[in-house]
Image: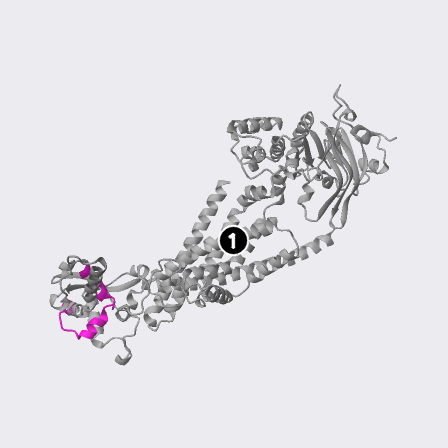
């Protein structure tokens, strides 16, 4: 090698090294920026969501005053009375409990707790409005409670929680405060006395959404709705998508028609999800007359949206199988179907699993198409079947975000996001675990 | 008359019938292959004798592998590939609509250039073919067939104690012998080998060549090879292909010692290729 050649190589080497350093620096900066944003995202979600998982509740000595509860004895079945008649009578008797002035008991219990007379509306405003149903159900459960005093743990109202958690500035003038001055002073006294304490808000995962008693509103309905939809997507989209991908990739002839299908599948993957919502509203609701707000219909819409993702990802997994494996199978005399099912699919399975999980996770987090089939309706029930009205976690987040009691619901929105992310992480963890297990087996 | 280009390292066994005396097992007549509009094989006719090794040699891209793949119709699996002409095995047309290609491939085994065991256990690699063709019913039958196939492929001693180990974990030479055992297991009459040693080291190559030598007592073997030495060592008949045409076909000794065609001579003396 002559000196001049070596010099030239050295010079070009310097240039190449510079280019490499530059490229590495760009990569490192990009990764840092991405990590920073992720840290900010999760930091915000956790710092705002986690505290709202703890809510104030009150331990009150409630006196079940017979003077207030005044309900006659339970009806006895008369001779010759029909079943339906007796049932109607019992229901009527139970309904009378709903008309009892439970708030009077709550007010008295608050007075008792702080040791002075609090103005009754202020006293009641501290406790969640669903507390009266808690008392009613306790009495219906055990009629002997009447006339006795029992320690009850009742949820604080959303406004009281806001005040106690310090979400509202104490400097705001009276007319801009949600609670009366007396109520605020009472809360401070109750917290001071340890009667009002922060506890983990299990009810957020057990209760359904509520507009009349926001403090006890929960995610259970949305959670179950999301589960139903995922079930529908897993049952429909995964088999249909995987089967389509296998057929298109392994069996279908290559001609203009299959080319057209391929182009359309690729295009569908890029269609905005809200368009699938429109399609669902037009086809499933207007033409097929399926019920509005049903998780089943939501699942169908999400299935349509997810199919292209699953098909495309599965096909690329199939395409990655080395031709030598196919040749080995065909060479030994396996039919095409045997080749696909005995040899190609087993090695593609992890890829197909990943494709399916990607699709299902995408469906789980989708909101827009659900709005168009009425899943943003307020539903205060856990849907018993996928055909009942229901909500979904992302839609619930959307609804809470728009709630007028922003001080209370904004942190809760983050808590709901944590629940949604937790569900997704669980799903992904399951997929990774399954994939590792299956890969080890081979 | 030129000097022999290659010395034959393996003398013809004494008393063995010469290849000419054997019955024709495979007959190809006017075979053509097109890939789309490009013609890869031009009117090739050839008779392959039974229980012997026939070598296909020729420079890269001459169509020898393509032609080999006609015999078990592997070309059918390639998009846009058309095969013309007639090929018979034991007088039976392999393109006869009544003959299932799956049945044909059970009778005509194939070993590929790169060892390609299934990503399954050694046992399942061998047992797979017999199972799908219904050759074995019981576990005992399968065990026996796996053992005899591995023995024929000279692999039994090396793997007998780890039949459950993955086939992909063997060395390259062992993998290729596993593939040969897999091909033998379905009881074929013909074994096609597409450059079976090109991915192997010289020692593994020698082992596989010895194996081919033994197998020819039972099977009709066609081997595509890049190595003329290998063709000379293992085969009784040699066919030389060039640009999709069969240039010369005859007894290996004759082809290497007294090639009739100047192109053959040029190739085996290293002037083209």
| Label 1 Cα crowd, 10 Å radius (few <14 / some 14-19 / many 20+) | some
Residue at screen point 27% across, 77% down:
A177
- Where on the picture, by quarter, is residue A377? bottom left
Lateral position of residue B184 relative to residue A46, left or right: right
Magenta residues span: A111-140
Percent of width and height locating residue A234:
46, 54
Colour mode of the rendering: one colour
Percent of width and height locating residue B98:
67, 38
Where is A135 relative to B189, above or below?
A: below
Quadrant location of the N terminus of chain B?
Answer: top right
- The answer, for residue A286, to whether it is visible in the render is yes
Residue at screen point 45% across, 50% down:
A431
- The answer, for residue B4, to whether it is visible in the render is no
**Closest to the observer: B124 or B240?**
B124
Q: Is residue A129 magenta?
A: yes
Which residue is the site of mark 1? A240
Percent of width and height locating residue B186:
61, 32
Q: Is residue A345 magenta?
A: no
**Closest to the observer: A401 or A1?**
A401
Percent of width and height locating residue A339:
58, 42
Q: Which secondary structure is most common in the magenta stretch?
A: helix
């Amino acid at each position: 090698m002559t000196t001049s050649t070596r010099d030239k190589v050295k010079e070009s080497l310097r240039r190449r090294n510079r280019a490499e350093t530059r490229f590495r620096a760009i990569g490192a900066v990009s990764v840092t920026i991405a990590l920073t944003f992720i840290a900010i995202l999760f930091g915000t979600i956790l710092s705002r969501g986690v505290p709202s998982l703890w809510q104030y509740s009150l331990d009150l000595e409630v006196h079940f005053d017979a003077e207030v509860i005044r309900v006659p004895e339970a009806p006895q079945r008369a001779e010759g009375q029909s079943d339906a008649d007796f049932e109607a009578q019992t229901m009527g008797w139970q309904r009378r409990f709903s008309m009892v002035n439970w708030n009077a008991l709550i007010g008295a219990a608050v007075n008792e707790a702080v040791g002075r007379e609090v103005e009754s509306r202020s006293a009641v405003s501290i406790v969640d409005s669903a507390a009266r149903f808690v008392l009613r159900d306790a009495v219906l459960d055990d009629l002997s409670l009447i006339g006795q005093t029992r320690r009850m743990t009742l949820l604080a109202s959303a406004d009281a929680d806001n005040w106690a958690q310090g979400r509202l500035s104490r400097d705001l003038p009276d007319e801009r405060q949600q609670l009366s001055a007396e109520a605020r002073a009472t809360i401070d006294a109750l917290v001071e006395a340890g009667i009002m304490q922060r506890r983990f808000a299990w009810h957020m995962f057990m209760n359904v959404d509520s507009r009349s008693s926001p403090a006890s509103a929960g995610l259970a309905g949305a959670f179950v709705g999301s589960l139903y939809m995922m079930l529908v997507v897993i049952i429909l989209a995964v088999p249909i998508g995987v089967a389509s991908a296998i057929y298109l990739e392994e069996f279908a002839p290559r001609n203009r028609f299959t080319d057209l299908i391929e182009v359309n599948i690729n295009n569908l993957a890029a269609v905005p999800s809200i368009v699938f919502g429109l399609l669902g509203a037009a086809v499933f609701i207007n033409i097929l007359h399926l019920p509005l707000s049903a998780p089943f219909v939501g699942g169908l819409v999400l299935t349509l949206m997810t199919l292209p993702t699953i098909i495309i990802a599965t096909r690329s997994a199939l395409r990655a199988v080395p031709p030598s494996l196919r040749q080995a199978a065909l060479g030994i005399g396996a039919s095409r179907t045997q080749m696909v099912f005995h040899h190609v699919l087993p090695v593609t399975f992890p890829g197909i699993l990943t494709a399916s999980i990607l699709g299902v996770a995408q469906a789980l987090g989708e909101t827009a198409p659900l709005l168009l089939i009425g899943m943003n309706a307020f539903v205060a029930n856990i849907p018993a079947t996928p055909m009942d009205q229901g909500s979904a976690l992302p839609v619930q987040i959307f609804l809470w975000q728009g709630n007028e009691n922003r001080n209370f619901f904004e942190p809760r929105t983050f808590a709901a996001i944590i629940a949604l992310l937790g569900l997704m992480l669980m799903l992904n963890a399951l997929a990774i675990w399954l994939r590792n297990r299956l890969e080890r087996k081979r | 008359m030129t000097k022999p280009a290659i010395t034959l390292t393996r003398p013809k066994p004494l008393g063995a019938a010469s290849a000419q005396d054997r019955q024709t097992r495979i007959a190809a007549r006017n075979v053509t292959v097109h890939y789309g509009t490009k013609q890869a094989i031009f009117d090739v006719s050839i008779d392959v004798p039974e229980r012997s090794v026939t070598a296909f040699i020729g420079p890269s891209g001459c169509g020898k592998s393509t032609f080999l793949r006609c015999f078990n119709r592997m070309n059918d699996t390639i998009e846009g590939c058309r095969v013309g002409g007639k090929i018979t095995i034991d007088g039976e047309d392999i393109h006869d609509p009544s003959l299932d290609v799956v049945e044909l491939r059970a009778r005509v085994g194939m070993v590929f250039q790169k060892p390609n065991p299934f990503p399954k256990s050694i046992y399942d690699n061998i047992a797979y073919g017999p199972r799908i063709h219904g050759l074995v019913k019981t576990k005992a039958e399968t065990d026996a067939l796996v053992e005899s196939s591995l023995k024929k492929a000279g692999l039994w001693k090396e793997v007998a104690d780890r039949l459950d180990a993955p086939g992909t974990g063997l060395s390259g030479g062992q993998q290729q012998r596993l593939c040969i055992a897999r091909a033998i297991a379905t009881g074929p009459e013909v074994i096609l080998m597409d450059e079976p040693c090109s991915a192997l080291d010289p020692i593994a190559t020698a082992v596989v060549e010895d194996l081919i030598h033994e197998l020819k007592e039972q099977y009709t073997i066609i081997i595509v090879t890049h190595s003329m030495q290998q063709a000379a060592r293992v085969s009784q008949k040699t066919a030389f292909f060039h640009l999709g045409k069969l240039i010369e076909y005859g007894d290996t000794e004759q082809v290497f010692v007294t090639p009739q065609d100047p192109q053959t001579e040029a190739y085996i003396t290293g002037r083209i290729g």
